[in-house]
Amino acid sequence: MSGLFAHLAPLHLDWGEIGAAGLDTLVMLAGSLVATVIVGLPLGVILFLTGRGRLLAQPAAHAVLSMVVNGLRSVPFIILLILMIPLTVLLVGTSLGVAGAIPPLVVGAAPFFARLVESALREVDPGVVEAAQAMGATNRQIVFEALLPEAMPGIAAAVTVTAVALVSYTAMAGVVGAGGLGDLAIRFGYQRFQTDVMIVTVALLLIIVQALQMLGDRVVAYVSHR
């Protein structure tokens, strides 16, 4: 039996290296996702609140902020990686490895997440805000005790979508030596024509995406029924 399947055994797999690359990808994903939520959540709230007819309506400020967010979203991530190399070096001291990947990952994902947060807030029934105002709630109370709790299912879904997008971003970051599964796939699977390495790295990325989606769906279901 072993002889029958011997020709199918991968010849180039170094599971230690694959494990280290997988860990790097998870670290990049976790670090950039946390930072993206920290930056993107308030940005999305501000985008919503400053819109026309909202609590803190500032059409001019909203237009400028929207332009900046749209501009960052329109830059292809692979180009953003290269453009940000000087800033990344200034911030973390290197443009390589896991540390060098996180700043461009955050800059690439935060505007995307902010727009999703804004959309989630727009889905909140205006009557919730009107009821809070009728009870004399301050703007701060309306945001933290009415808007955000009501929008939580949408925000949880936005986190899930952003996490899945970040997985693909981490793979692209391998082009500039960021490490992780994308870097492994490029260096061995593509440049050295080691198809087995490419297949394994793609399979691991698919597993990560599926796990994130399943976890995200559970979180959304939980917060929707609270």
Image (cartoon, rainbow, N blue to C red):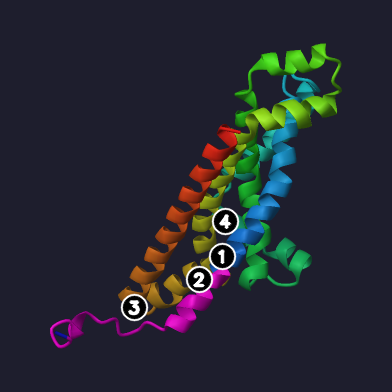
Is 135 inside the magenta-drawn segment? no
* Residue occupied by mark 3: 194
* Residue occupied by mark 1: 26
* Residue occupied by mark 2: 22
Q: CA distance from mark 1 to mark 4?
A: 23 Å
Closer to the camera in the image, 103 or 139: 139
Whether residue 83 can be seen here: no
User: Which one is earlier in the sequence, the residue at label 1 or at label 4?
Assistant: 1
Q: Amino acid at mark 2?
A: Gly
Q: Amino acid at mark 4?
A: Ile
Quadrant containing the N terminus is: bottom left
Q: Which residues are magenta?
A: 2-24
* Residue occupied by mark 4: 79
Q: Is residue 159 above or below residue 200?
A: above
* Residue located at (75% from left, 14% from top): 131
Residue 155 image offset from top left, x and y in percent: 61, 37
Query: Are discs 1 and 4 less than 8 Å apart at CB?
Result: no
